[in-house]
Image: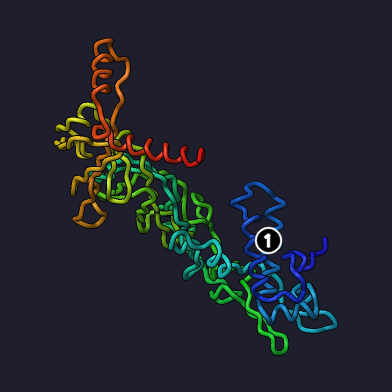
Amino acid sequence: MSKRDFYDVLGVPRGANAEELKKAYRNLAKQLHPDRNPGDAEAEHKFKELNEAYDVLKDDQTRAAYDQFGHSAFDGTGGRGPGGHPGFGGDFGASMSGIFDDLFGEFMGGRGGRRSDGGRMRGQDLRYNMEIDLEEAFEGKKAQVRVPSSIACEPCDGSGAEPGSKPITCTTCAGHGKVRASQGFFTIERTCPTCHGRGQIIEKPCKVCHGAGRVEKERTLNVNIPAGVEDGTRIRLSGEGEAGMRGGPAGDLYIFLSLRPHPIFQRDGADLFCRVPISMTAAALGGEIEVPTLNGKRVKLKIPEGTQTGKQFRLKDKGMPVLNSRELGDLYIQTTVETPIKLTKKQKELLKEFDGISSKETNPESSGFFARVKEFWDGFQT
């Protein structure tokens, strides 16, 4: 089956600049990445095809060779290109570590997937979502999480080689993981086809991990959640992510926190808000009420005469702690005047009597509003 034209694979014209090539590659790589298409053989083939095309066209020298000789410049047939020209060798799509460091290798500041010495590769970073109550965010807590992850294989100590043996240096690349080929002024560096960039070869793979240097296992970890965390706070546990390949360093574990809605309090940063209903008589005559705080204590609050719905009272330092600080937010109590329902005959008579002796001074807000409404209507009649 003949290879597709690399420009067609990326969906760009032959005159496309480097930025256009990179943008086209990013969009297609995100669509075709194996993590988004598990088990899709066609998507996997297109993804490899895309990597090979971009790896050639992103470099000015290899792109010039491709524009002149096409696919035959990289066919690796005895190191000869068309017409007896020295070739460059194949497998340009294999060396993708630099590209994936840019696109997929980093997770929230991590360095997942980068190669290290001896073919070792850093483990991937992991994410764990944890939901906590507002009270737990107020006090802080110590929690345990169970994380399915990869850990270093014990029998081979993470090397991937059968106990009693160890990886040997690749003779093709002398342990560098890359080989070079030249044509005229072109010098092309590509991934070693023998060791696939690791620089080492495992002759006797470990029977437990089959040469990977790691195995799957669920772990229990202790997490310290400090007081004052907010919704979306991220906690990083260094080295608690996925184990690295063949003895490489482990990735990190990121705990993402979300807060459950609270039945009484609403949060805005370090401040808390609480709506408290008060009776019509308490609002009119004034008085004292008890309001809750998030630590379970009660605070007495004085309600002045004539308190209206929406009136806010500030209780200083009764809010949330500020993360990594000794400061505290405030608690705001917002009153809601409750209209009485299911009145008895006697209560209705008393309210009617009260209404009969009320005046503009008793209800200044409603009196002023309806006075403005009357002026508004009179304006239309005029």
Disc 1 residue type (three-letter): Lys
Which of the 4 image quarters holds residue 259?
A: top left
Residue at image point 54% right, 76% down: 176
Q: Which residue is mark 1?
A: 48
Q: Which part of the image, by quadrant, shows the N terminus?
A: bottom right
Residue at image point 67% right, 59% down: 47
Label 1 crowding class (10 Å Cα cut-off): few <14, some 14-19, many 20+? some
| Camera sees residue 165 | no
Residue 240, percent from left and from top: 38, 54
| Camera sees residue 199 | yes
| Horizontal relation, residue 186 to residue 122: left or right | right
Which of the 4 image quarters holds residue 252?
A: bottom left
| Horizontal relation, residue 346 to residue 261: left or right | left
| Horizontal relation, residue 78 to residue 140: left or right | right
Residue 364, percent from left and from top: 28, 37
Residue 7, percent from left and from top: 76, 69
